[in-house]
Image (cartoon, rainbow, N blue to C red):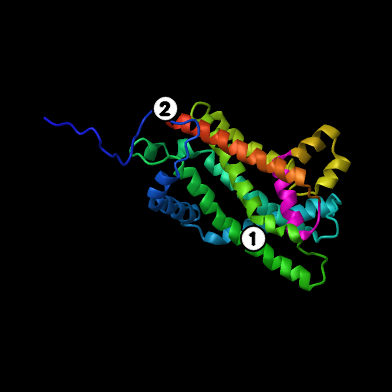
């Protein structure tokens, strides 16, 4: 009886994995599934709602109006000559993409345990689909921001872009990596500690106010206690939001140190999240 010793297997499913396992070739083979998950994420969010995708527009606009009334009109927060509504809309547009990537990725294992327990596919496709599908929402909100930008510019507002706009794709990538990395870490931990799923929503709201979304970093330095101001300034989300406004509105501060510091933190957290995610997926079905 002959034995086949040199079989070329298409897939090898094993408990032994590399420390950092991000198999692009395997993900490419499952690209149809990735596209299917992206479509699912886009379609099902506002399915059977009256306004549907209009919520993509309503949420940032209403939040910007509230921030303008509370922080700028009532709290006298200066925006450096930029119309407060436009200033807030820029920060909220950047923040929303990071927030959606983080909160939805953080429930990957618990929300998809039924699928994960029945069929094999690269588990990392699920958080990747969330990150990609949120790009559509980000693009819609960015288009709304550009529309208001043009409106204010035509009405004489002192707004302009600067040469740092060439870094725009890198900032989007940093937002995605940071949200994806933190989300995978939290998702892995929630398989054992369910309290984290409740804590995430609360913590994300607090993080927004410590990430210079409704105010510039200069105001944090001037009005916050020194320890809080330092946390706000070195918060990587703050650096992304501030850089986003600096590119588009030419207001705020930008330093190459802050840029590379944030880039390193985002890549590091993504790699840490990927390692923890890969280790958790081998045994999560027993604890989830």
Q: Is residue 179 left or right of residue 107?
A: right
Estimate the spatial distance between the alpha carbons at disc 1 and disc 2, rounded to whole Å.
Answer: 40 Å
Name, please, the residue furthest toward the bottom. 154
**Whole-percent x and y of residue 272?**
57, 33
Query: What range is drawn magenta here?
Result: 235-252
Mark 1 — residue? 142
Q: Is residue 190 above or below residue 9?
A: above
Name which residue lies at 62% across and 59% down.
141
Q: Is residue 62 visible?
A: no
Q: Give the main secondary structure, helix, strand or loop, of the magenta stretch.
A: helix
Label 1, secondary structure: give it: helix
Picture coordinates of residue 159 (x, y %)?
79, 64
* Label number found at residue 283: 2
Residue 6, above or below 62 = above
At a point 73% along the width and 51% down the height, the residue shown is: 243
Check if mark 1's residue and mark 2's residue have beta carbons within 8 Å. no
């Amino acid at each position: 009886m002959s034995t086949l010793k040199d079989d070329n297997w298409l897939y090898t499913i094993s408990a032994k994995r590399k420390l950092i396992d991000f198999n692009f070739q395997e993900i490419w083979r499952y690209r149809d599934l990735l596209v299917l998950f992206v479509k699912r994420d886009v379609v099902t969010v506002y399915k059977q709602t009256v306004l549907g995708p209009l919520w993509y527009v309503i949420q940032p606009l209403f939040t910007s109006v509230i921030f303008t009334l509370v922080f700028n009109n009532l709290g006298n927060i200066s925006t450096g000559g930029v119309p407060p509504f436009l200033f807030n809309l820029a920060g909220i547009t950047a923040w929303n993409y990071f927030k959606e990537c983080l909160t939805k990725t953080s429930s990957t294992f618990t929300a998809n345990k039924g699928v994960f327990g029945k069929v094999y596919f690269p588990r990392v496709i699920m958080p990747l689909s969330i990150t990609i599908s949120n790009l559509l929402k980000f693009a819609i909100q960015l288009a709304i921001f550009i529309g208001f930008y043009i409106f204010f510019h035509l009405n004489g507002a002192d707004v302009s872009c600067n040469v740092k706009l060439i870094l725009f794709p890198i900032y989007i990538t940093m937002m995605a990596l940071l949200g994806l990395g933190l989300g995978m870490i939290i998702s892995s931990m929630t398989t054992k500690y369910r309290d984290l799923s409740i804590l995430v929503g609360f913590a994300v709201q607090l993080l927004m106010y410590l990430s210079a979304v409704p105010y510039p970093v200069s105001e944090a330095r001037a009005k916050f206690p020194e320890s809080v101001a330092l946390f706000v300034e070195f918060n990587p989300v703050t650096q992304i939001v501030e850089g986003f406004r600096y590119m588009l509105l030419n207001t705020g501060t930008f330093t190459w140190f802050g840029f590379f510091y944030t880039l390193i933190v985002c890549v590091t957290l993504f790699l840490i999240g990927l390692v923890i995610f890969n280790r958790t997926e081998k045994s999560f079905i027993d604890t989830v």
